[in-house]
Structure formats: structure tokens, C-alpha cells
Image (cartoon, rainbow, N blue to C red):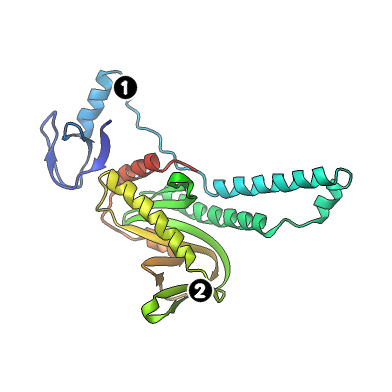
Amino acid sequence: MEPRLLVLRRADACVVCRAELPEGATAWWDARAKAVTCALCQDEGARSVGAPAEPVELDRGRAGASAARERERRKERRETQVREAHPRTAALRLRLSRAPQRETAFRSGELGELAVGALLDKRAANGPLIALHDRRMPRGRGNIDHIAIAPTGVYVIDAKQYSGKVRAEDLGFRGVRLMIAERDRTKLLEGLARQLSVVRHALDAHDHADVPLHGVLCFTTGDLPRFRKLEVQKHLLLTCRGLGKQLDAGGPLVAPAIEAIAHALAAALSRA
């Protein structure tokens, strides 16, 4: 197992130079040797064996990529079926017909992800926030639209482009339902909970168990409360503007810690 760059949860000392490393410092952890190496000694060691000194480039992914691929795949299949069934009139039929709802739904999802991705990338450009897009869920269970690593923690963000009023309906002992345009959309929260479980597992596996983790449904359209934050089943329901304010807040994570967490998550959850 190769050494990993991480944020120390307790004070330690570099195994090479014996320099004191305080809690919260960024260092390299060797799980086999149970030893910590400071960044300077790690770099010198890498150069001594001819390894490149440049850090590994972070694969941030591309917002909306999975939705765009699925929409294009469905479109190509539909057009192929029409051409095979009606070779002479296929062009006219395709020009006059409308795309089916499932196909347009993927386009809507792509647009929502692009909008949220643009917001995240704009804030990431000024740091210290880092955004990852379109990450693969294990065992083919879909994808995670966005992961934002901010001073206040890690945010798993599911972009949604729905119209209508968004509200929480309290059912007493039966819990709380998510209602959008008076339709029960609580399953959206179940999907978000699965994504959070995957990200939590990745954080724990890379010694970031203490990092706060937040689930967000970000609505690019829809009618949400203007002057209060909506929360259902401990998940935040936010507009793009509300998400921006949430990510801009100060918190305990500093830039080196954010970068270490981003690299760990990008390695554990590859682009979809």
C-alpha cells in the first residue's frame, strides 16, 4: 500500500527528520510502517529515487457528462429504429416527431448539473473550495452529480431541475415527506442518502472520518422558501444561490486539508 497524503487527527513526528507535526498538519501516512513523513522529507525521498516531484493532477470530472451520454445514446437508438422501420420517410418522421419524455428528462438533468457545476467551478476558481463532478457509484448504482469540499466540510450535491413548490410535509410518527408540485418525491432523498453512504465510506477509508458530511438537493428551478433554509431528513434543500452562501461560510478545514480530501475522494470515486 502506497503512502497517502492526509490531515493528522493527532500530533505526531516525522519518522525521517523527527520534526514535530501538530494536529491538523498535512503529512504522508504509511499504513504498513505505521509512520508519518513530513511533506519536505517525502519530496526529498521521491527525488532521490528519481520520482517526479510534481503532485498528481486532480481529476475533477465534467458536470453533466453521464446525463449527456445517456441522452445521446437514447436518441441514437430511437433514430436508428425509425430509419430501420421507415427507410423512405425516416427523415421527415424524425423532423416532425418529439423526443420521448425519458429522453428529454436526461436533457433536463444535464442542464441542471451544468448550472450547479458552473456555480461550483466559479467558486473553486478563487479557492479554497474544490469541486468534483460526475463521480461513479460502486457496482453500477448510478452516479454522484457533484462533490464540493469546502471549509465547512464535504457536500454531496444532487442537482435537480423541477418546477413547482418545494416543501416538507410532516406526517408525525411516519416521518417527513418531500413534496414537489404536490407530488411525493421523498425517493430523491433516499437516493441522496445512498450517495452519502458511499462518500462516508471513502472518507473513513482514507482517514478522514472526522470530516463533516452534508447532503444537498440543489434546485436550479422550483419554488423554495426565500427567507429560511429548508431541511428534510437532515438533508439541505437549496437553490443555487443558497448553495453558494452555504459553501462560502467559514469553517475548520484549511486549504491543505481540503486538497488532501479532494485527492482521496477523486481516487476512491472515479469519474463516471
x and y percentages locating residue 100 in the rendered image: 70, 57
Q: Residue at x 32, y 49 (%)?
A: 201
Is 140 on the left or on the right of 11, as rendered?
right
Is 68 on the left or on the right of 132, as rendered?
right
Question: Decide: marks 1, 2 in contact (CB < 8 A)?
Answer: no
Q: Which of the 4 image quarters holds residue 58?
A: top left
Name, please, the residue furthest toward the bottom: 172
Could you tell me which secondary element the residue under label 1 belongs to? loop
x and y percentages locating residue 33 in the rendered image: 17, 31
Crowd class of label 2 (few under 14; some 14 to 19; many from 20; radius 10 Å): some
Is 261 on the left or on the right of 119, as rendered?
left
Crowd class of label 1 (few under 14; some 14 to 19; many from 20; radius 10 Å): few
Q: Residue at x 63, y 54 (%)?
A: 107
In depth, the one of 128 and 27 nearer the eye is: 27
Q: Earlier in the sequence, mark 1 or mark 2?
A: 1
The residue that disc 1 covers is: 51
Q: CA distance from mark 1 to mark 2?
A: 55 Å
x and y percentages locating residue 249 in the rendered image: 34, 61
Q: Residue at x 70, y 48 (%)?
A: 75
